[in-house]
Image: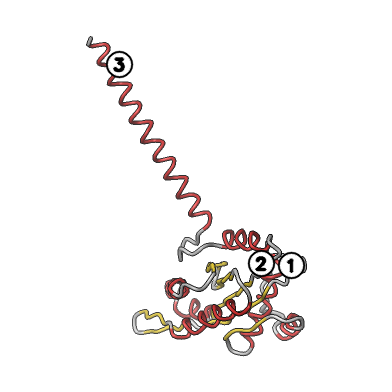
Amino acid sequence: MSTASTLLLATTTASCIALLARNRKLRTDLVTARYEAHHDALTGLPNRRALLLHLDYLLADRTRPVAVALLDLNRFKEINDEHGHTAGDLVLCRVADTLTALNLSRAMVGRMGGDEFMIITDDGMYTARNNAEAATRALDAATVTLGATQFGCYASLGLALADHNDVTAVDLIRRADAAMYAAKRRGGGVKEWHQNIGATVTATLPMQRRRYRF
């Protein structure tokens, strides 16, 4: 083989190797981007986008029961204000690990943002209630230690079941939100949504209500 042919073969081989390496990197970058688009950077849980996509998918089937539990940490703002965001981040990660370890039945657990988490149960109220109660029990027992200070992970949880009367993801989350604030008003635990709960909570806690953007 001539020198020119050998040089051409070597150059072509090097180009092919470089192209394969570039393609591998592009595939890796794409997988990473897809993961990051649907997962919370701090806790690794599915994020708001992933939760809403999953909920919309489930609600599209009007024959299947679907329930949403919205979980909000009690006194989280005080932890952040008094001990800093490092303490707050440790609490959030501890909550995420605790909920994940439960391996809840037919459920997707994720972080909506801030100190708010969601449990979507692809089943009826019996399973959803068991999941919600298991979550609150586990969080009641969970603690985080930072130096000489120990923090609890106590939470209030609102539960709402889709009745499939043209209920949307927004409707279901707002119902769970109203129930969650009713639970917070009584000091924590699990509260199920009912028709009159929204008016009661709005009247008693008008300044604490979140305004969701969907």
Tell me how the rendering is colored: secondary structure
Question: Which sits earlier in the primary sequence, circle 2 or circle 1?
Answer: 2
Q: Amino acid at mark 1?
A: Val
Discs 2/1, front: 2
Disc sitting over residue 30 in the figure: none
Rounded to the nearest angstrom, the CA distance separating label 3 from label 2 is 63 Å
- Which quadrant: the N terminus? top left
Direction from residue 91 to residue 2 in the image, left or right:
left
Label 1 neighbourhood size at 10 Å, few (<14), some (14-19), many (20+)? Answer: few
The crowd level at tag 3 (other Cα within 10 Å; few <14, some 14-19, many 20+) is: few
Q: Is residue 7 above or below residue 79?
A: above
Do callouts 1 and 3 mark residues in contact (Cβ within 8 Å)?
Answer: no
Q: Nearer the viewer, mark 1 or mark 3?
A: 1
Circle 2 residue: 64
Q: Nearer the viewer, mark 3 or mark 2?
A: 2
83 w.r.t. 60: above or below: below
Element type where label 3 sits in the image: helix
Q: Quadrant of residue 159?
A: bottom right
Residue occupied by mark 1? 167
The type of residue carrying mark 3 is Leu
Q: Secondary structure at mark 1?
A: loop
* Upstream in sequence: badge 3 or badge 2: 3
Q: Nearer the viewer, residue 60 or 135?
A: 60
User: In which image quadrant can residue 117 be found?
Assistant: bottom right
Residue 205 image point, x, y percent? 69, 83
**Structural distance between the alpha carbons of marks 2 and 1:** 13 Å
Q: Which residue is mark 3?
A: 8
Question: Which residue is found at the position 34% from the left and 84% from the top?
Answer: 148
Q: Position of residue 90 (x, y in %)?
A: 42, 73
